[in-house]
Image (spheres, rainbow, N blue to C red):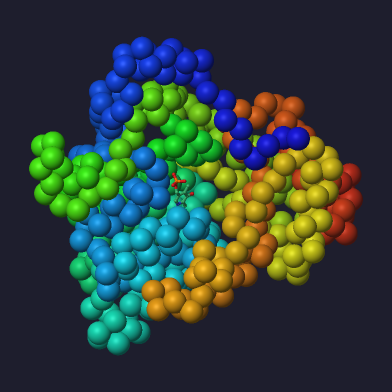
Amino acid sequence: MIPVSRVRLDPSTEARVLAVLRSGHLVQGPVVEELEQHFATMHHAAHAVAVSNGTIALELALRASGIGRGDEVVTSPFTFVATLNAILAVGATARFVDIADDFLINPESVADAISNLDPWHRSRVRAIMPVHLFGQTADMSALREIAKASDLALIEDAAQAHLASGPHGIAGSGTGRGAACFSLYATKNLTAGEGGMITTDDDAVAAQLRLLRNQGMRVRYEYETIGTNARLSDLHAAVAMAQIGNLEQSTQQRAANANRLTDALREAPGILLPQVHPGHRHVFHQYTIVLSAENGPAERHRFISELAARGVGSAIYYPRLAFDYSCYSNRDDVVVHDVSNARNIATRVVSLPVNSTLDEDELDSIISSVIEVATLLFGGTSPAQLAGNASANGA
Ligand SMILES: *Cc1c(COP(=O)(O)O)cnc(C)c1O
């Protein structure tokens, strides 16, 4: 089965990890510092602060920006649950607004939600948390304007967006007094096994993050604030350091794979292909297609099992909206606006393999299988006719 994600570490990883083991210094130290410097430079950020995972990165970024109990954070419902858990962990309220067809938070929905609030609630909104889902950045230019107009912090969930960029710059740059949070989890575009990274241009936020991740102390046993242990270990940092020099290349490989899929699947019936906005660099953490509206959950299930029968793995990111579970229902700190587009899209998405380890045969197999299954389930058109159409179009 061709897997949606495949972790293949550079051979140099072993030597780097071994060097840390032999040094006897396993915890946060020189390798973490090296990774932070590399990450900051790569993302044109004044600071990069390493932490133990992407979820705690979001949580600490909120806390370092002064967001806590009674505050509200406007965010996307179409995301991994970590976005929501981080907001709740600091005691804030999550306010969910809709996404556009590109899976990303709709700036108009953000603006509408804020302007329709009563003055009391409006004064509690302190931050916007856009999610650069699947590797494409949200419309940061529009969101920055909204944030500026209402004096809000922008805390970006960039867990899936290493090296993604848009007209506003690369994800993690130009954060102003906000921050961007990355994950270094095993399946992310850059991995430490487990890990996270926060970039910010705000010296005070960076200093606060360094305190928070280490029990609130700069000098041993002198606690300046109530912190936690969110340190990254040098062992984990060594794993990420072994790939970071290769990240640009593996990102280009993902984009090349995505282009190949998009060129070949254009004629497949009943599916919508991922949109890349002009001026954006999509880093394809996932290649996510949307089945046509007339196809229900049963068709999606069949689509996935027919692909599996042909040896092609696929996955649903995400089957339900982040808050759509009983543990989040009937809570005052989870507020849901009109999210009808997100609800609709969540029933129709399927992610196909796009990872940088795919070889030519695997890409061919993904393409022919998707065309075959889409034609079988959704097409009145035969694959032969499709091939004819493709060549007639000069594709
Ligand atoms: C992976 C991910 C996170 C959390 O990162 P972890 O390192 O797994 O804690 C947060 N948000 C999104 C969108 C993610 O994909």
> Residue 62 at what x, y percent from top left?
28, 57
Location of the N terminus by quadrant is: top right
Q: Residue at x 29, y 52 (%)?
A: 60
Residue name at image x 79 percent, y 43 percent = 308
Which residue is at a point 40% across and 38% down the rendered structure image? 195
Viewer-proximal residue among 60 and 144: 60
Residue farthest along the front direction in this orientation: 221
Q: Nearer the viewer, residue 78 or 378?
A: 78
| Circle count | 0
Residue 329 drawn at (x, y percent):
51, 75
Residue 144 drawn above or below residue 236: below
Q: Position of residue 254 (x, y in %)?
A: 55, 35
Quadrant into which the C terminus falls: top right
Residue 349's image quarter?
A: bottom right
Quarter of the rendering containing residue 105: bottom left
Residue 389 seen in render: no
Residue 312 versus residue 125 in the image, above or below? above
Left or right placement of residue 333 versus residue 368 in this view: left
- Could you tell me which residue is drawn at 67 percent across and 49 percent down? 315
Asked if residue 219 shows in the view, the reply is yes
Eyeballing the image, is 318 above or below 395?
A: below
Residue 85: x %, y % from top left: 42, 60
Left/right placement of residue 209 relative to residue 352 reads left
Q: Is residue 78 left or right of residue 387?
A: left
